[in-house]
Amino acid sequence: MNYAPFLGIAIALLLLPGCKKDEEPVVDLGLDYYPTDVGSWVEYQVDSLWQDDPSNVRDSVSYRLLERVAEAYVDDEGRPARRILRYVRDGNDEWVVRDVWSSTANSTAAEMTEENVRRLKLSFPVIDGRTWDTNIYNTEPELTVAYDEVDQPFVLNGSSYENTVLVKNTVPPNFVEKREFQERYARGVGMISKYREETNTQIVNGQFSVVGWRWTMTAVAHGSD
């Protein structure tokens, strides 16, 4: 019996999975920039400053904040979601819950509901120049942001992160109004830094007069329990 035809069919069948793999490469969407594992946490140093020069008011506050993915559940829209507990230290240096936020993430977007304000935090895939309105789901003024420095290393508070991405606003400040927004994310960790500034500067009696605030968050530790 001539076994050559059967041998050829067998070889062809063995090659089929390999061909399919080549035709359907795995696409890296950057989903691990927004991890959702229950028990994961990040601790931040938070510093804020606000000033109202016409009223001669200037003050600041600094504190530690810990954000922890507490549990998984299904939200009112039937989507897999995560409950985020946000802790601050009390007078006895104990962590106490200050806020309860919620978050959802899928293959196209990551959202966070902060103080009942829903924000579009990341838009997938993570690629240079991709833009979106982070306030598209709420009533706040439009804030268009874009990806920059995709998959770049970054050092923060003595910790080295191999792959990070910067999310920043696309509208530059003018002489009067400044609306600065920056968030940096690290693969496998999530957000590691944040900078917000909204100020209005006028010239009064020949001097600069500023009304507004600045706010920074920088990661000092992260882990999982």
Image (cartoon, grey):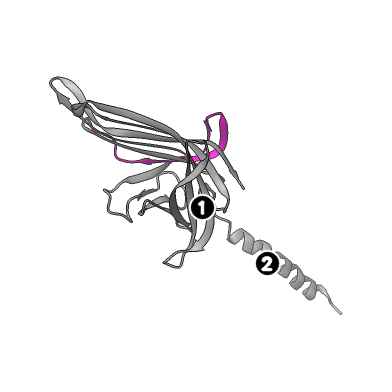
Q: Residue 29 shows which numbered tag?
A: 1
The answer to whether residue 62 is left or right of residue 10 is left
Q: Looking at the image, which residue is at 42% across and 66% down?
A: 76
Q: Residue 16 shows which numbered tag?
A: 2
Is disc 2 surrounded by few (<14), some (14 to 19) or many (20+) residues within 10 Å?
A: few
Sequence-earlier tag: 2 or 1 = 2
Element on which disc 2 rests:
helix
Q: Residue 170 shows which numbered tag?
A: none
Q: Amino acid at mark 2?
A: Leu
Please provide percent x and percent y for residue 79. Answer: 46, 64
Q: Amino acid at mark 1?
A: Leu
- Cα separation, mark 2 vs mark 1, equals 26 Å
Q: Nearer the viewer, mark 2 or mark 1?
A: 1
Q: Looking at the image, which residue is at 72% across and 70% down?
A: 13
By secondary structure, the bulk of the magenta-drawn segment is best described as strand
Looking at the image, which is closer to me, 37 or 108?
37
Looking at the image, which is closer to me, 224 or 14?
224
